[in-house]
Amino acid sequence: MAKTKNVLPPRQHLIGSHWSATAPMDRDKHFRVVNIGRARGSDEGVDFIELEAVLSGRRRQVPKEELMDPSLWRSDWK
């Protein structure tokens, strides 16, 4: 059975939401959304999500499609 995509919360609830990487990234596993980005000239929608690692404070930008992939990310800290 194929996994369904993660569902992103509405834009106003996305900032501050918690996410866990299915595999640690540079020893970081738990992240919170700190920013939502759009491509230049785009007035609506989300193009990328900026995540901040809880322990190290390192930030990374991921395309929204990557965050919606359950093989890479899980919503909440698990």
Image: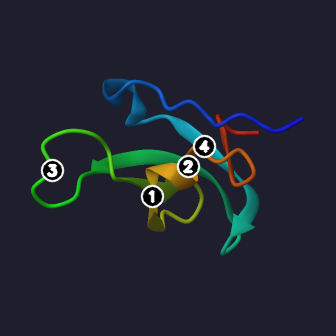
State the separation of the CA atoms marked 1 and 4: 14 Å
User: Can you give x and y, in whole percent of width and height, for residue 70 in the image?
Assistant: 71, 44
Mark 3 surroundings: few (<14), some (14-19) or many (≥20) residues within 10 A: few
Horizontal arrangement in the rendering, residue 4 relative to residue 8 (left or right): right
Residue, disc 4: 19
Residue, disc 1: 63
Q: Which of marks 3 and 1 is nearer the N terminus?
A: 3
User: Can you give x and y, in whole percent of width and height, for residue 66 in the image?
Assistant: 56, 55
Q: For residue 67, which numbered disc appears in the image?
A: 2
Q: Which residue is drawn at 56% across and 65% down?
A: 56
State the separation of the CA atoms marked 2 and 1: 7 Å
Q: Which of marks 4 and 2 is nearer the N terminus?
A: 4
Horizontal arrangement in the rendering, residue 17 relative to residue 15 (left or right): right
Q: Earlier in the sequence, mark 1 or mark 4?
A: 4
Q: Which of marks 3 and 4 is nearer the N terminus?
A: 4
Q: Is mark 2 on a helix, strand or loop?
A: helix
The reply to whether discs 2 and 1 touch (Cβ–Cβ < 8 Å) is yes
- With respect to residue 25, does 19 lie above or below? above
Residue lying farthest to the bottom in this orientation: 26
Q: Residue at x 75, y 51 (%)?
A: 71
Residue, disc 3: 42
State the separation of the CA atoms marked 3 and 4: 25 Å
Mark 2 surroundings: few (<14), some (14-19) or many (≥20) residues within 10 A: many
